[in-house]
Image: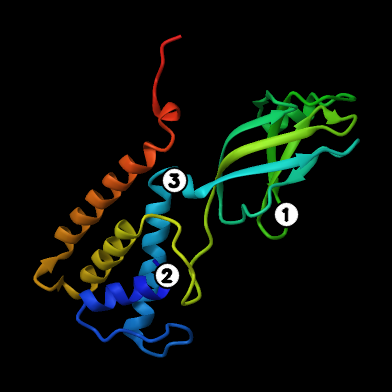
Amino acid sequence: MTYLELVNGVLTRLREPEAPSIIQSSDHVVNMAKALVNDAKRYVELAWSWNATRNVWLIQTEKGVPSYILDGTSGGARISKVAIEGWHIHQWDLKTLIDGQVGTGKPYRFAFDGTDDEGNISLRLGPIPDASYSVQVLGHRTLPDLKKDEDQLRLPDQPVLYYALALAARERGEVGGQTSQELFAMSQQYISDAIALDANLSPTEKTAVAV
């Protein structure tokens, strides 16, 4: 669903007129629905490591350069694996990594050492690379807020729509005879169902195996 469709979905259920566009709207109800849709998007997004938020960062190290920026992480990210030349390396705390940084070589550990001016996460390798190495970073990054009419929601739409509606109902007291408590329960069920479907796309990652 697009941002406009999500907002109109909330407005329809609030028994409000649909908006032809939500860009620069002066209608306070439309603007409330716009804000609540993005609030709901952030809530649903953090409820699970969705396949839609997966990302692979490919970095080529430079000799003598210890830190590298992970683009598009200003909204937050969850990093699950860092590998160099196909080999998994382990995370250390930054102080230990820096204190033990002697000389250069092929990195075998990493830490996060802050952000750049845009808020993107910085990855520091240890020891400092002595040559060019291929680094693969796997994880999930937070998607940007919806802004334009045609912006597509990459997350499951029903959980976001109904969580936004539940937030709106909390403001009004009820929507179409349904209380906010009922709508929150519905949105949680939609989230649970969506997680179950999403987990089927990567079943081996969610299975515990005795070794």
Q: Secondary structure at mark 2?
A: loop
In terms of image quadrants, where is residue 80?
top right
Mark 1 nearby-residue class (10 Å; few <14, some 14–19, many ≥20) = some
Nearest to the eye among marks 1 and 3: give it.
3
Query: As shown in the figure, which amino acid type bears the numbered disc 3?
Result: Trp
Mark 3 nearby-residue class (10 Å; few <14, some 14–19, many ≥20) = many
Mark closer to the chain start, 1 or 3: 3
Specify the label residue 116 is tagged with.
1
Query: As shown in the figure, which amino acid type bears the numbered disc 1?
Result: Asp
Q: Which residue is mark 3?
A: 50
Residue shown at the point (50%, 73%) measured from the top left: 147
Image coordinates of residue 137 in percent, x first then y, are 65, 37
Residue 139, compared with residue 44, is above or below; it is: above
Image coordinates of residue 198 in percent, x first then y, are 38, 42
Mark 2 nearby-residue class (10 Å; few <14, some 14–19, many ≥20) = some
Residue shown at the point (24%, 64%) measured from the top left: 166
Image coordinates of residue 112 in percent, x first then y, are 67, 39
Nearest to the eye among marks 2 and 3: give it.
2
